[in-house]
Amino acid sequence: MSSLDQKNIMLDPQKLKNDFPIFKSHRTLTYLDSGATSLKPKAVIDKITEYYETYSANIHRGIYKISELASQEYEDTRIVVSTFIHSNRPEEVIFTRNATEGINLVASTIGSDTVSAGDEIVTTVMEHHANFVPWQQLAFATGADLKVIDINNNYELAITNDELQKAQNKSIDLKGVVTDRTKIFAVTLVSNVLGTINPVKEIIAAAKKINPHIITVVDAAQAVPHMQIDVQDLGCDFLVFSSHKMLGPTGVGVLWGRYGLFKKMSPYQYGGDMIRSVSISETTFAEAPHKFEAGTPHIAGVIGLKEAIKYLYHIGLKHIHAHEKDVASYAISRLNKEFGENIKIFGPSAIEYRSGIVSFQLEGIHPHDIAQILDEHDIAVRAGHHCAMPLHTALGVPATTRASFYIYNDEEDVERLIEGLKKVRNVFRGR
Ligand SMILES: Cc1ncc(COP(=O)(O)O)c(C=O)c1O
């Protein structure tokens, strides 16, 4: 029995692989790019097919059985998502196209209504472009200052405490970072490059201590698929994630927000399903969540997300998180052992502050070449800047190779990666 089996007997990746049809058509595939998008279990695919085959009507408008069933399945998903992230009420859950759209919605509604010249928007250098560019553009449009928090030598946010302070339980101090001019604080819960898990609860508490009116936005795209999230415990105002990274379909995202804020916010888009009444002289809008869901949504996708969440529940987020840490930890030690001084692994040294993402650089070999050669051996990794160019600038490298692990990965996949990388090294040795 391997060390992984001993720690997580509840999660058996080899058995779970049987649930993912892609492994039947690609029997030798080693998929290490779940950070980009996860694979989809048969239960999710079947649920989407069920909608199209048996009740593919539009929602919220048909006075007939299959439309009512579609509406019920769609609204049921809202309840399931709400419970999944410990929201106060289902009306706090807005379905979007993806995490990116959720952040853009917040930036262009409450963001542009709240921020003006001379104000501050605080974000971090660790952000995916989805949680960076909307704030940068809002700052440009309004004349606000964009403050960008750097990372420290251990690939954590520079505002978080060092190891010694953490051991002594010292709280985070944001003096000078957050001021009474700060209107927005946008931060990722988990970095999609470094795998760093940020102490977002403590960061938000520290920010609100200085300025209780601050609006906090959490990018949880790399967190919700992998660990239990409680929006109330985090204390944030908005939180976003994408279905496709958590075993669900593409084209669906979630924006969670405090209902009191949603009530005050103006709509993001105008059209059908988001109105209360329309006349030639005026329009009144529906309440949240419908106010923010203009037009026909991705009905099949939303219903598929419900099935994905059921699947995650079945395994248990606690087990998923523990399993990914084990695989990442194993990968880090194997990479270091095989490649020694020729490899640089990015991300916190303590595994407790990391998720299942391992980004690295092999000396003298471009990440694109690595990914291409690995692909010849059916190993899928991501290479490039991973939509985090400011972070790569801070790291001093243009690109990295990223292996991201999920429930269907285990030590065997890590060994295949190591073997693949040895082959990459052999190709370049001869040059
Ligand atoms: C941390 C993080 N935030 C946001 C996104 C954007 O997700 P989407 O493209 O689904 O909107 C990603 C996608 O990789 C991500 O990793």
Image (tube, grey):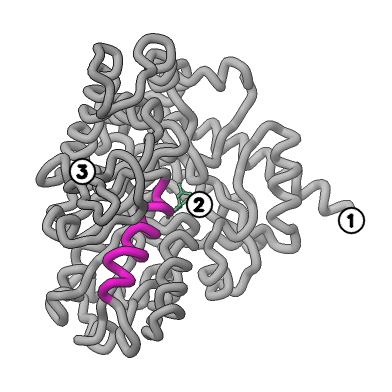
Picture quadrant of residue 87: top left
For label 1, the residue is: 431
Q: Which residues are magenta?
A: 98-114
Q: Main secondary structure of the magenta part?
A: helix
Residue 358: which numbered mark, if any? 2
Q: For the C terminus, give its image quadrant.
A: bottom right
Question: Tag 3: Cα neighbours inside 10 Å, few (<14), some, or many (≥20)?
Answer: some
Q: Is residue 137 visible?
A: yes
Q: Nearer the viewer, mark 1 or mark 2?
A: 2
Q: Tell which residue pokes out farthest to the right in this image.
A: 431
Residue 251: which numbered mark, if any? none
Q: Amino acid at mark 1?
A: Arg
Residue 235: where, in percent of width, then height?
15, 60
Label 1 to label 2, Cα distance in Å? 27 Å
Residue 140: where, in percent of width, then height?
45, 80
For label 3, the residue is: 85
Q: Nearer the viewer, mark 1 or mark 3?
A: 3
Q: Is residue 226 visible?
A: no
Which element is circle 3 on? loop
Residue 82: where, in percent of width, then height?
19, 39
The structure residue drawn at horizontal position 55% and vertical position 72%, both measured from the top left corner, is 395
Do the numbered discs 3 and 2 sit on residues whose CB atoms are within 8 Å? no
Q: Is residue 228 above or below residue 185?
A: above
